[in-house]
């Protein structure tokens, strides 16, 4: 019914709360990264503002018609009763690079001026924070907590979180939890086909396998020829690559500076590939797979964080994959 794919239970729970007339003032949208939490938050915010403004001709889902005044103002970034807090670029002239590591305290304090006056278009105001995990601690978190403890009249907070367990308990306790889960493979595939109409069926299948239920994660791999990379990974895991031919070739191709995106995709994909292979195993084979997963899950983030030699890292990761081959 709604164009927001997946997590129908979460959507229904929020819709029921909206219809009930007593909407909680703060919601924690929690779940894996890339499953649609932020998209839902912004769609829900738009719907909340449109309904409060008395707009008619609204459908039963969260979408607004193109002629909606609320939709037009949000698209133009000019809605006076909406705020969207997220990490900002360090250089405004280069918005797609050098993104700040956190949502700064100045951004949170900016809400004070926003709350100093009554809402303009209706009695309602909405604040989306994407993601609450990125809010600078302790200063910005404490400043936000004050607003959650004493919310301005008519204000709804929608807080996106990929790691709710890391948040301050006092923030979690002020929110109603709305849990989002990983999407089914068919749901991810449908979204990918819509976003990547030129992609081959083999590439879509590879992206679905690499997604781990996260369309956002899959889109991060788009254009990287994941189908061929997936084939190389599977070949090592199946044959054991006893003459090191495959891992040597991968090390050369992925070790080049221009191949950095594919190199990072390889490091990200291998642990989830191993995890999938562990299902259905038992005994020594399962132990080998679990040990390989632990090693791969450690190596990938370490290699990126410490800028380890790419060729050596790919070769080592290939050796970890080879542990899956039958002895």
Image (cartoon, rainbow, N blue to C red):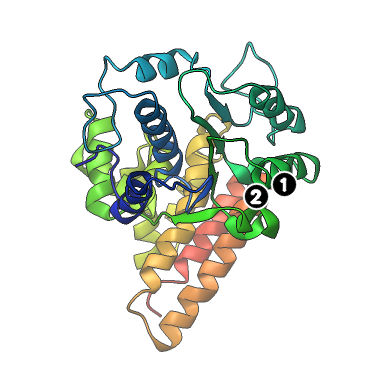
Q: CA distance from mark 2 to mark 1?
A: 5 Å
Q: Does the CB distance between marks 2 and 1 fall below 8 Å? A: yes
Element marked by disc 1 = loop
Q: Name the quadrant of the N terminus.
A: top left
- Residue at point 54% right, 23% down? 119
Q: Does 277 appear above or below 7?
A: below
Q: Name the quadrant of the C terminus.
A: bottom left
Mark 2 lies on residue: 303
Q: Nearer the viewer, residue 227 or 14?
A: 14
Q: Nearer the viewer, residue 111 or 321?
A: 111
Task: Find residue 198 and report its image quarter.
Answer: top left
Q: Position of residue 323 (x, y in %)?
A: 47, 71
Q: Is residue 234 left or right of residue 257?
A: left
Q: Position of residue 185 (x, y in %)?
A: 26, 54
Element marked by disc 2 = helix
- Residue 306 circle label: 1
- Residue at point 22% right, 42% down? 190
């Amino acid at each position: 019914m709604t164009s927001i794919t997946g997590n129908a239970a979460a959507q229904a729970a929020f819709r029921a709360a909206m219809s009930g007339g007593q909407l909680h003032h703060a919601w924690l949208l929690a779940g894996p990264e890339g499953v649609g939490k932020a998209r839902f938050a912004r769609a829900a915010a738009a719907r909340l503002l449109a309904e409060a403004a008395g707009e008619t001709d609204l459908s039963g889902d969260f979408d607004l018609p193109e002629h909606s005044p609320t939709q037009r103002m949000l698209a133009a970034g000019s809605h006076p009763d909406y705020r969207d807090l997220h990490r900002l670029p360090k250089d405004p002239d280069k918005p797609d690079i050098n993104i700040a590591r956190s949502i700064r305290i100045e951004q949170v304090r900016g809400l004070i001026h926003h709350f100093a006056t009554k809402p303009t278009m209706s009695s309602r105001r909405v604040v989306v924070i994407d993601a609450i995990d990125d809010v600078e601690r302790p200063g910005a978190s404490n400043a936000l907590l004050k607003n959650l403890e004493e919310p301005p009249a008519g204000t709804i907070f929608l807080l996106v979180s990929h790691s709710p367990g890391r948040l301050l308990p006092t923030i979690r306790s002020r929110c109603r939890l709305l849990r989002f889960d990983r999407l089914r493979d068919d749901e991810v595939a449908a979204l990918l086909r819509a976003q990547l109409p030129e992609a081959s069926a083999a590439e879509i299948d590879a992206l679905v396998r690499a997604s781990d239920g996260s369309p956002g994660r899959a889109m991060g791999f788009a254009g990287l020829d994941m189908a061929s990379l997936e084939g190389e990974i599977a070949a090592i895991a199946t044959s054991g690559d006893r003459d090191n031919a495959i891992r040597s070739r991968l090390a050369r191709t992925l070790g080049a500076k221009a191949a950095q995106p594919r190199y990072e995709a390889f490091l990200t994909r291998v642990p989830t590939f191993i995890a999938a292979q562990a299902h259905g195993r038992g005994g020594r084979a399962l132990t080998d797979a679990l040990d390989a997963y632990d090693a791969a899950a450690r190596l990938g983030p370490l290699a990126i964080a410490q800028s380890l030699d790419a060729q050596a890292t790919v070769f080592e990761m290939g050796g970890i994959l080879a542990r899956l081959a039958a002895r």
